[in-house]
Image (cartoon, rainbow, N blue to C red):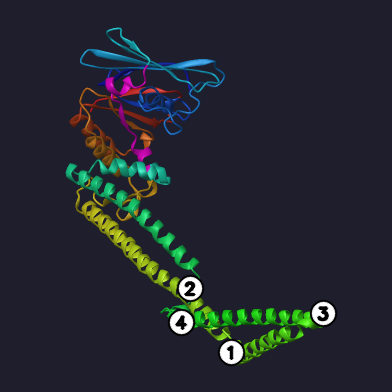
Amino acid sequence: MKVISIELKNFKAHEELFLDVNGKNIFLLGPNESGKSSILDSIFFVLNPAKETPETKIQKPLRSGQKDGYAQIVVGADGKTYTVTRKFTEGSDERKIIIETSDGVKTTKLDMLEGLIGYRHINPFEFVEWSKTADGRRKQLQMIETLLPEHVIETLNTIKRDIALKDEALKTVNLERLTLERSVNSLGVTEVDLQKYSEPIDIADEMVKLKVIQAANAERAKAVEELEQINESIDEYDKEIKELEIRLTKKRVERDQKAVDYANKCNWIDRNPVKSSAAVEARINEAQEHNSRNTLVKKHAEQCVALKEKSDTCNGIKAEIEGMREQRRGMIALSDLPIDGLTFDTEQVYLEGLPLHANQISTSQIMKLAFAIALAMEQPEKKLKLLCIPRGESLDTHSVEQLKAFLHENSGWQAFVEEVDRGEEKLKVEYFES
């Protein structure tokens, strides 16, 4: 499939333009600001099947001072043509698309572009310029990887998926490790605690002793209470003696008996003094404090073991990931790429060990790289394949011959070459054969 014609109205530099391409390869000649780049932009603007994003959108397609415009491209193959028109108006980002077949069938669905035309294009100089940004370097890598043998690409993709899975596993384990680490630190166990409270103290015997002492003291307290009650009884009896002299004898006997009881209780109390439990209680409190710290030490030890296991797991996953990356680097190093010294890693593309950059790669190498990428694009012959080359004036004779040879050997591709020609006063189109 080839471009048959290009028609522009109020598109960027062009008020009106009709270009009869007729499937040929063309040079766009002319001075700066003559509209050469606008023609290349119109191809991308009209035929790009991707949803419009800040990366894919041609900024300000409408010619300055105009209200509306359109860009129309006719492509065809084997007697069938497709007319694709993009319309746009002032102050609106909406770009209406109309696709019409040679049979008169029309559609406004952007998704149909991929199925009908399958547009693919390569701008070699733009490819090299991508190296200036992180996103551009990622795009370079994606395109360069298509140059590798199919089995290598499949293996690299498998490794990439495995690395992604391992990265997720590492994140999970590392989060668990950090949680354990915070828990261990929150216990407040010191090195002194680890030595001093490593074993618990058995307080069973001391608890028995404490219970014996507490029972004895309770019995004595009861005796003191009874003593007070007896004393109160004596006072009552004294009162009764005074009041009831006639009952004196009887009461004296009773009183004497109470006095004996009192004396006996006094003797018993004297023989059973209050026992101190302070020492036992102190030992129990000390042991309980010790055992509390012992519990923390045990928990600290358990979590330290778990923390070490998580750390070992993290290190193991990291080692696996590095092994996969090393395997990937080895496969890339052993793979044949179309330019001597061209390689890449997970970050960017390199030439002769240096990052790929326009200042350190020749025009001939750029063209060779573009041809290799073009060949790597598995695209049916009936789909549209374009080589769009800006700054064609930088191509030396050898590069032009390379381009013509490539087009001769790969007739499914069509070339649009933009070239500043200061000898021309306005835009000029030249056709060239491969």
* Relative side of 276 to 45, left or right: right
Discs 3, 1 touching: Cβ within 8 Å: no
Is residue 282 shown above or below 302? below
Discs 4, 3 touching: Cβ within 8 Å: no
Among numbered discs 1 and 2, the one appearing first in the sequence: 1
> At numbered mark 3, what does the secondary structure look like: helix, strand or loop?
helix
Discs 4, 2 touching: Cβ within 8 Å: no
Badge 4 local density, few (<14 within 10 Å), some, or many (20+)?
Answer: some
Among numbered discs 3 and 2, the one appearing first in the sequence: 3
> At numbered mark 2, what does the secondary structure look like: helix, strand or loop?
helix
Which quadrant holds the C terminus? top left
CA gap between label 4 and label 2 equals: 12 Å
Among numbered discs 4 and 3, the one appearing first in the sequence: 4
Identify residue for label 3. Answer: 243
Identify residue for label 1. Answer: 272
* Relative side of 290 to 130, left or right: right
Q: Name the mark on residue 292.
A: 2
Q: Name the mark on residue 196.
A: 4
Discs 1, 2 touching: Cβ within 8 Å: no
- Tell me the amino acid under the disc marked 3: Glu
> At numbered mark 1, what does the secondary structure look like: helix, strand or loop?
loop
Say which residue appears at 30% left-offset and 9% top-offset. 105
Expressed as whole percent of the image width and height from the top left, the position of residue 82 reads 30, 15
Expressed as whole percent of the image width and height from the top left, the position of residue 269 reads 62, 88
* Relative side of 5 to 31, left or right: left
Q: Which residues are magenta?
A: 109-128
In this view of the protein, which residue sits in the foreground, 390 or 214?
A: 214
Is residue 340 shown above or below 207? above
